[in-house]
Every structure is written in C-alpha cells, then in structure tokens.
Image (cartoon, rainbow, N blue to C red):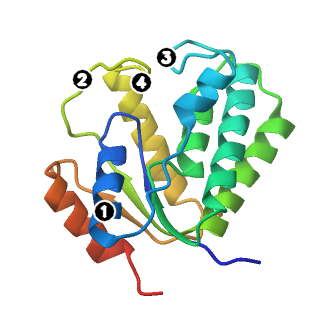
Amino acid sequence: MTKYHGIGLCGSHRTGKTTTADTLAAELDIPFVETTTSAVFAEHGVSPSSPMDFDARLWIQDKILTAAEEIWSQHRHFITDRTPLDMLAYTLADIQGRTQVDFEALQHYVARCFAATNRFFTGLCVVQPGIPLIAAPGKAALNQAYIEHLNTLVLGLCQDERQQVPFWVLARKCIAISERCRFIKEKCFTPL
C-alpha cells in the first residue's frame, strides 16, 4: 500500500484554511491539493448553504469524500484544506435529537472517514475561528454559532482513539498568515 504524507488543515469553514494551505504549499514547494467540496455540491445540484435532511447530508458527504480520496491518491506528499474529519464533522452537525438516522450507514461513513484520515495524512492542524467573517458567493453559511459547533466537533474527532494521526491546534488569536504558516511548518512537517 502506498504511504502518503499529507498535511491536513482541518476545522470549520470560513477560518482561512484554504489561504493558509495555498501559502504553505508555495513556501514549501509541495502540492496544494484543493478539495472540490463546492464543485461536488454544484455537480449534484446542491447548495452548501441550503438545509438538507440527514439522508441527503450523508449522501453528499460520501460523494465529497470519494472525490477527495481520488485527488489525494494522486500525490504522495501534499497539503490540503479539508480532511475526512471535516467531512465527518459536517455530517454529525446535522444530527439533532429527533433526526432520523440510518445508524448502520452512519457507522460505515464514520469508519470510512477515520480510515481515510489514517491512510492519507501524517499531520493535522485544526485551524480555529478567528479571522473576520465575510460573505462570498458559493461559500457555506456565515452562521457564527454553526462555525463554533463544527470547530468543537473537529476538536473532538481529532482526539478520538480511531484517529491515529498527530494533530496540533492553531490558537484562535493566530490570524496573521505568516504566524499560521510558521506554526504549521514547525509542528506538522517532518522530513521524508
């Protein structure tokens, strides 16, 4: 089996993960493997900011994970702005007390997300909320409470015993791109 050396920036949407990953990739001369979350939503005629029932959420998240795995498998060493733990957090965030859930299907997806994380990544960095929120077309909702909810879920998923990849948490106050990059380079990158 191929050994991948991916660095994953994880956390809620609208936290600056994409900009940080792109900057790091340029500084370190490694591929920035951008996930196609928005493209997958568009391909299937779904808006990322639209409410959806749990079956629809699980279905689209499965499509997103499949697309990401296809992209990640094309690179041995890379940095990306989304991880399977992010995808799992979005899925779990849609479950409320009365949500109808096919638990077997959910458990399959959960196992798949942890397996993909362990296969493709050698370091994770949780990028927490901190930068100013600005609306943009095609981007996920700017609901600050939802962003915090997702951040908390990602922090918990990183600590789950099924997740075997070392991870670090970027402080909320660390919003300057140079500081973010320095922290991630010091913590997440190991020589090949």
Disc 2 versus disc 3: distance between alpha carbons?
Answer: 14 Å
Q: Which amino acid does label 4 sit on?
A: Lys
Residue at image coords 42%, 42%: 152
Which residue is identified by label 4?
Answer: 139
Task: Look at the picture and state if 69 lies above or below 103.
Answer: below
**At 44% from the left edge and 20% from the top edge, which residue is drawn?**
138
Q: How far apart are marks 1 and 4 (CA)?
A: 24 Å
Packing grade of label 3 (10 A; few <14, some 14-19, many >=20) is few
**Tags 3 and 4 touching, CB below 8 Å:** yes
Q: Separation of disc 4 and disc 2 at Cα? A: 10 Å
Q: Say the numbered circle drawn on residue 103.
A: none
Q: What residue type is labelled 3?
A: Ser
Q: Residue 26 carries which label?
A: 1
Q: What residue type is labelled 2?
A: Ile
Which one is earlier in the sequence, the residue at label 1 or at label 4?
Answer: 1
Extreme residue toward the bottom, this view: 192
Numbered circle sitting on residue 134: 2
